[in-house]
Image (cartoon, rainbow, N blue to C red):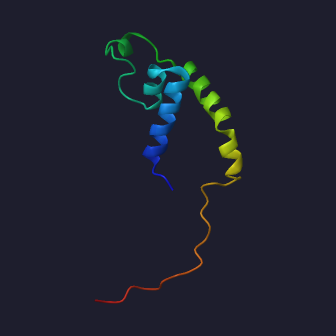
Amino acid sequence: MLPFNSLRDTSADMVRQLVGEEVALLHLAHKHQSKDENLRRYTNPVRKKHFNALRRLERKLSVVFTASGDAPWVRPPRTTWAGPRPKS
């Protein structure tokens, strides 16, 4: 299983390809959503664009979500148990 940061980085890259850098920075939840540090102080973030980008990304990845089944994060039970560790 991939670590969370791999999924986070990959999804941010996909969002950037779909709608641009500003929305990708919002997706990553970085402090500054633009190269202009004052822009954040005087304007609202582009959350509607981010929401629409996530909807587009969900449609794009729907084949993967469908193939993973109803509970993709549920691990199957372990079938073996090694027992207690031997004392040193």
Residue projecting furthest to the bottom: 87
- 77 relative to 39, above or below: below
Locate residue 88 relative to residue 76 in the image: left or right: left
The residue at 51%/56% (across/down) is 1
- 15 relative to 82, above or below: above
- 4 relative to 83, above or below: above
Locate residue 64 relative to residue 35 in the image: left or right: right
Counting from the top left corner in percent of width and height, residue 71 is at: 67, 55
Q: Nearer the viewer, residue 32 or 7?
A: 7
Residue projecting furthest to the front: 17
State the count of labels. 0
Locate residue 75 relative to residue 43 in the image: left or right: right
Q: Nearer the viewer, residue 32 or 18?
A: 18
Counting from the top left corner in percent of width and height, residue 16 is at: 49, 26
Which corner quadrant of the image does residue 63 belong to? top right
The residue at 65%/45% (across/down) is 64
Residue projecting furthest to the left: 88
Locate residue 36 relative to residue 62 in the image: left or right: left
Quarter of the figure with the C terminus: bottom left
Counting from the top left corner in percent of width and height, residue 76 is at: 62, 67
Which corner quadrant of the image does residue 78 belong to? bottom right
The residue at 61%/71% (across/down) is 77
The residue at 56%/80% (across/down) is 80
Which corner quadrant of the image does residue 29 belong to? top left
Counting from the top left corner in percent of width and height, residue 74 is at: 61, 59
